[in-house]
Amino acid sequence: MMALYRYRAVDAIGHVVKGQIDAINEFDLEAQLKKNNLDLIGARPVKEHDQTVSKLARRDLINFIFQLEMLLRAGVPIQAILSDLRDTAETPHIKNLCANLYEKIDSGSTISEALAANTGIFPELVVNLVRAGEATGQLADVLQEVVLSLKWQDELISKMRQLLMYPAFVTIVVGSVVIFLMTYLVPQIVGFVGNMGGTIPLQTKLLIWVSAAFVKYWWIIVFAPFILLLSMILLAKTNPQFKRQMHAAQLRIPYIGPIIKKIILARVSDTLGLTYRTGIPVLDGLVYCSNISANVIVQEAIDRARTDIANGSSISQGFAGQQLFPSMVIRMIKVGEETGDLAGSLKNISYFYNRDINDSISRVQALIEPTLTIVLGVILGWIMMAVLGPIYDTISKLKLT
């Protein structure tokens, strides 16, 4: 366990320095002080810190692995790397993580074993890639591949968030405008129309009914979508069949569904290429591909393809039988198998999907803006017709004297 030490030390000219610092033990404390040209006089632990890190931001993880890769490639010993990263860490999470890894490796664990002990920080795929790198003596190269993959996945997640947040924002804007019209503006206009007397047309009666429903039950209308969404999420966690149906429907959403599928398949092809390039067998790589796929339909297709490949089919035949990838992607995989450059083909597939995803998101965003204008125009047009219709009828019946 890491502890916070209160220490007394002396500098080069004999001045006594007091302070507090995190360290694994007194030997580690003394080593840290030596780097600052201080000699330890005495120290005592103030309190212990739990070194277990249960969560780490994706970008912090990418930055940590990148620094690890660069320093290993430069020939710096792993314990020296972790010690330096711990001392220069900008966040307590990174500091505790480095201290945890340092302690485990100092106790005899391998790097992969130390990473595996930090459950929730390093994915199982990363741990196994590091283990493969240790076995082949190409750990720095493997870590470089991991960094590139994590960066690419971070971009995909950002694109997914961008894809989903924009329609959500548009929906909130349209909903807010409708609620304002129905609860504030329409009741005032309808009151004016009612005082004019005369026959109220059907569309005006419908507007009055909708407005009254919004005024009386606005809290149901506002919170019902969130309650419905939460109920669906909870039901999907407890009912596998419902989860499967919901994931199938997710891929059928107009415009958005195909993009979601492309993002999932892009991660699959990138993961399969990463595992293949680092020496992990294809069948094991497909297990990781299935695990990182958030959609049950895609997971089932990958599992069936893996079974076919295990029974003697080629990779291209296994995927073609599931109709998971487009025919062009299947041909690229087949060419890679025939030429012996499957890793290159999978990398090209990732590039193809990345470009296609960017184009698809741009098209959807360009489509949403005119759709918002049309929806608002229809709502305002209906309100105007429902309100101005009775006024026009009343004015037309007036007789000039």
Image (cartoon, rainbow, N blue to C red):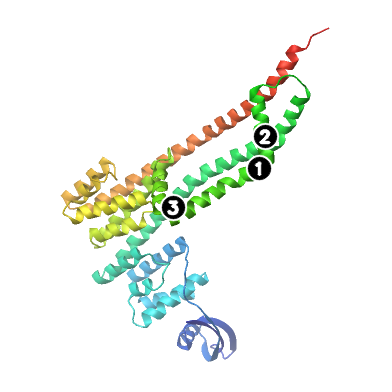
Q: What is the quadrant of residue 121 in the picture? A: bottom left
User: Which amino acid is tagged 2?
Assistant: Ser
Q: In this view, does 377 lie above or below 258?
A: above
**Alpha-carbon span between mark 1 and mark 2:** 10 Å
Quarter of the figure that contains the C terminus: top right
Residue sticking out furthest to the top: 401
Circle 3 packing at 10 Å, graded few (<14), some (14-19), many (20+), is few
Q: Residue at x 41, y 40 (%)?
A: 360
Report which residue position mark 3 lands on: 157
Residue 5 rendering spot, x and y as whole percentages: 54, 85
Going 36% across and 67% down the picture, which residue do you hit? 69
**For the residue labelled by badge 1, is the local secondary structure a helix, a strand or a loop?**
helix
Residue hosting label 2: 211
| Tag 3–tag 1 contact (CB < 8 Å) | no
Tell me residue 351's x, y (percent): 33, 47
**Front label number (3 vs 1):** 1
Q: Distance between the residues labelled 3 and 2?
A: 40 Å
